[in-house]
Amino acid sequence: MTKVSFQLTVNGRVREASVPPRMLLSDFIRHELAMPGTHVGCEHGVCGSCNVMLDGKAVRSCLMFAIQAEGSEITTVEGLATGDDLHPIQQAFWEEHGLQCGFCTPGMLATAQELLAENSDPTDDEIREAISGNLCRCTGYEFVISAIRSASVKLRAAQAETTLQPV
Amino acid sequence: MKPSAFRYERPTDLQAALALLATGGDARILAGGQSLVPMMNYRLAQPACLIDINRVSDLDYIREDGDVIAIGALARHGAIKSSDLIKAHLPIVAEAYDWIAHAAVRNRGTLCGNLCHADAASEMPAIMQILEAELVLAKVGTTRTVAATEFFVGTYETAIAEDEMLTEVRIRKPAAGTGWGFEEVAMRRGDYAWCTVVATLEISDGNIVAPRIAIAGVNDCAARLGTVEGALTGKKPDASLFADVAATAAEAATPTENAAYKRDLIRALLPRVLNDAVERAG
């Protein structure tokens, strides 16, 4: 099968790809880049487990072909933490028990990241609306909502600290 | 679940895209891909060639063109939902998007792609029909304009020809004082509609003028309710009138499934939509 070659940036690192056009972005990330943090649930855009950040926007990686991401910047769950330090959203999920089996978590984190980037202090209703496209079969969502609420507090505190630093 | 193999083309201008489409060979336009790619993953669609228009940046616009709002083939749902132009002139479109898919899907999906997919349970085909949108269909060397009311033929069926592409949706700004209503019942927000009812109308001297009403999620495709519109024209808004026309509409519906329940939904939702539209008119 004819392959196409291109470059893209994943978690800050430029990657070379040579794949058939029909390869989904989700499969490319998991199988070609060997980054299994992006989970594949339904493969038709319903469950949200495969959400990743593409040029700053959350997208379903199972509904894109890898070739379409040529030249783009992708952030997967592997790109969130800094070394051993969890991202504040991850830390909040940890503290608030925002996950049980963890299958939906990478997608939830991408969705939460986009929500909190656009709305630093969402109401519970806005959080519910934002995660309505991510299915979780364990938690009943309440702990996920608590986690995102807690993450918004952490991120605002971190933002205030940065802003208040003497120049 | 893997799509079958296809030839991938990624033109950077519209003419090149149309030329590729003209060469035939079972080619499909790929815009947001939020309906086409799931169908390909299921192999319900197996196009031989995909023409990816995501780099045809000239098609990514929402703009004012005199008294018309023009929306290009690459305008994403998310951009339309948050557009100040849309909020100011077409509030029903901005508000309805709360019910259409989820943020991650709206980030990629396009209005034009959604209309071409023509899902019977999709909201925008109904809304475009009450807004009397015009759809610009281009092919090599020529374009034609089709009214939204003529575009939807059946489930997943439209008036578009194989060598044509929907390049722009043109919506005349509604007259000042036009009221609107939108109601939907679905399993959860963003899922397929079990029943959507939409309406716009004006009020003049206390009477209903130019009512436009459509339903989606019930029949084999979204459609205007001409009989109901006729029954409301020139009448004073009135609860028993609204209940009567809702009963007529429910009876006239041809639900593809769960007929009794869908008829109940029409009876419940249509009066609410009309009340909201009357309240917003002024």
Image: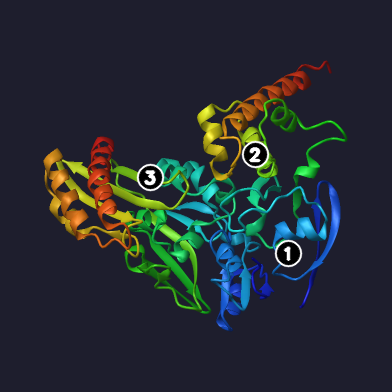
The answer to whether tags 3 and 1 share a subunit is no
Q: Residues within 10 Å of mark 3 (few under 14, many from 20)?
A: many
Residue B218 point in image, percent of width and height: 32, 58
Q: Quadrant of residue A86?
A: top right
Q: Residues within 10 Å of mark 1 (few under 14, many from 20)?
A: many
Q: How far is mark 3 from mark 1, CA to CA?
A: 36 Å
Is B72 left, or right, of A80 in this rendering? left
Report in which chain the residue with disc 2 lies. Answer: A
The way the protein has been coloured in the rendering is rainbow
Marks 3 and 2: CB-CB under 8 Å? no
The quadrant the N terminus of chain A occupies is bottom right
To which residue does mark 1 refer?
Answer: A67
User: Which disc is residue B220 wearing?
Assistant: none
Q: Nearer the viewer, residue B40 or B109?
A: B40
Q: Secondary structure at mark 3?
A: helix
Q: Secondary structure at mark 2?
A: helix
What residue appears at the point 78 percent right and 73 percent down from the top-left corner? Answer: A3
What residue appears at the point 77 percent right and 16 percent down from the top-left corner? Answer: A164
User: Which disc is residue A114 wearing?
Assistant: 2
Is B276 left, or right, of B53 in this rendering? left
Q: Is residue A110 above or below residue B212?
A: above
Q: Nearer the viewer, residue B192 or A118?
A: B192
Q: Nearer the viewer, residue A136 or A157?
A: A136
Is A50 left, or right, of A131 in this rendering? right
Q: Earlier in the sequence, mark 2 or mark 1?
A: 1
Residue B188 point in image, percent of width and height: 45, 44
